[in-house]
Image (spheres, helix red, strand yellow):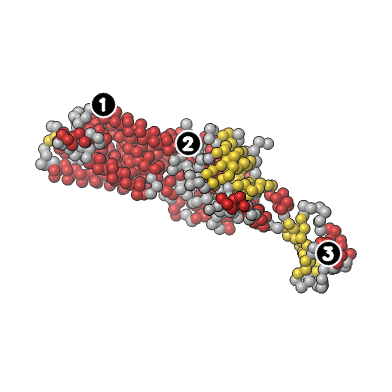
Amino acid sequence: MNGYGIKAIYLFELARTWRTLMQSIASPVLSTSLYFIVFGSAIGSRIVEIDGIHYGAFIIPGLIMLTILTESTSNASFGIYMPKFTGTIYEILSAPVSALEIVIGYVGAAATKSVILGLIILVTARCFVDYSIAHPLWMLAFLMLTCLTFSLLGFLIGLWAKSFEQLQIIPMMVITPLTFLGGSFYSISMLPEFWQKVTLFNPVVYLVSGFRWSFYGAADVHIGISLAMIAIFIAIFSALIAWIFHTGYKLRP
Amino acid sequence: MQPIIDITGIRKTYASGLEALQPIDLSIQRGEIFALLGPNGAGKTTLISIICGIANPSAGRISIDGLDIVRDYRQVRQRIGLVPQELAVSMFESVWDTVRFSRSLFGCKPNDDYLSNLLKDLSLWDKKDSHIMALSGGMKRRVLIAKALAHEPSVLFLDEPTAGVDVELRRDMWSMIRKLRHNGVTVILTTHYIEEAEDMADRIGVINKGKIVLVEEKHALMQKLGQKTMTLHLNAPLPEIPAALQEYNLQLSEQGRALIYQYNSADRKEGVAPLLAKVGELNIDYHDLSTKQSSLEEIFVSLVHQPDTHNAEATP
């Protein structure tokens, strides 16, 4: 195990976050605040409660998810795409580090950043609404697992992407819509029965639902199913990454 | 002595069908400076990329220090430093951070003393806190060398190290390479500058169209293929070549003031002594004499431009 190597990659990636502090931390916090003002205050004054929870508080888990899903994906994909783009990847490929160690370094850093971001948003939310967390440890576990899952996805996209357009198309065209439609701002029980069924094909539903359960003890789907879905995603993304490293596909010509 | 790098049957065919390397067999001796010489697109970078783990070979195997580059990749890569051809270096980092990163990435314990000395040797010390994007191209090249040496490798690959580099840096680089060799580091450099190979290398390999055309100790190569030219500068012009000197195939130039003799220095029968003795007998006075060995460039051009019907057909 090349511990120095993992640490080098991990710290390099985190340093990139500090260098781009405004873009990395400040802008997601700002946009989340805007969501709170628009959805929480404006719309929330019309919708008083969902499942017995004040609407402003109800949307907190969904808003955090919305941010960390897109941030994990774009940050992790950018982290590995840039060295490919500038050519500095030669050093990583020629270094005595295994695929697993490379993934731990890059994905670990992206996930760390997203966890920090999620916690910052949680604190920011305090300025707008009162909320309580029923299962704080589960909340942290869900937060970390989700960040990990989508950082893996981002890393995968970064390995695969050949252009900046490909890099951004999945976060923009897939993840953001799925998150909006995944029950971030509403309970799926509010939908007509047909759309409730359709929604169950949206993986983000399970993440938001599980995360919201850790806050308020109420969920659209069972917590066990949420955890199982996360495990399945991690398995799929990890297998694809392993396959890329194994075959050298788009990585080692 | 066991060679430090042993390349057996390495082949590389790209998905497009392009055959970048035909089966290559090559051994690099410990502690030598080996120059891989070839025109653009000959396969130099592909070969180096395969040895360093950046590209996968289609077939064949490579061992370094007796260790397989795939199975024992950790030990192997710790021994190798690579200076790539492109100036690929993370722009937003400082010089100091980037060399520390490299050392750590290659699994070495931090050693700031070693890194400070390295930067001083490469005249980078006063730039250590500069961001890399603020450096000139030559300085970036030095940074790449520092990164490649940060983990104290025993084999150093330099891919076209002096492409687009000014005279001063080129001189610095050559003296650094000699110093490394002195410390026991094996150096493999690719170049299409012939003077570079001629000046630096102990051995030269010529690669063309993915094939190693020739590997030879430099002096032997130049001797084997090296024509020499001797010019006698005469005191009085000769109207024509004396009949007694007919057998030497001489030429007259400078309106009869210079006699030119082409010979092969490796062939003892030819030599210059018998000719000079004859010239003395004929009382031809000369005030100076010069000899010139044909350069590696001439040798190289004759090798690379040999007609090769087999390859000519394969080229689109």
Q: Nearer the viewer, mark 3 or mark 1?
A: 3
Residue indicated by mark 1? A224
Q: Position of residue B138 (x, y in %)?
A: 52, 55
Image position of B308 (left or right of B145): right
Q: Secondary structure at mark 1?
A: helix
Chain letter of disc 3 in the image: B
The image's mark for residue A97 is 2
What residue type is disc 1 on? Gly
**Residue contact between numbered discs 3 and 2, judged by CB atoms under 8 Å:** no
**Mark 3 is on which residue type?**
Gln
Given residues B275 and A98, the one toward you in this image is: B275
Q: Estimate the x, y position of residue B249 in percent, counting from the top left.
A: 80, 63
Looking at the image, which residue is at 23% across and 34% down? A200
Disc 3/disc 2 C-alpha distance (Å): 69 Å
Q: Amino acid at mark 2?
A: Val
Q: Earlier in the sequence, mark 2 or mark 1?
A: 2
Check disc 3: other Cα within 10 Å, few if <14, some if 14-19, many if 20+: few
Q: Give me the C-alpha separation between circle 2 and circle 1.
A: 36 Å
Where on the picture, by quarter, is residue A65? Answer: top left
Q: Residues within 10 Å of mark 2 (few under 14, many from 20)?
A: many
Residue at figure coordinates x 56%, y 58% from the top left: B166
Which residue is at the front of the view, B100 or A146?
A146
From this view, report whether residue B114 is shown above or below residue B208: above
**For mark 3, what is the residue?**
B246
Mark 2 belongs to chain = A
Q: CA distance from mark 3 to mark 1?
A: 102 Å
Tag 2 near tag 1, CB within 8 Å: no
Instruction: Please state which of the two labelled residues, at mark 2 or mark 1, is closer to the viewer.
Output: 1
Q: Which mark is residue B29?
A: none
Q: Is residue A75 above or below residue B305?
A: above
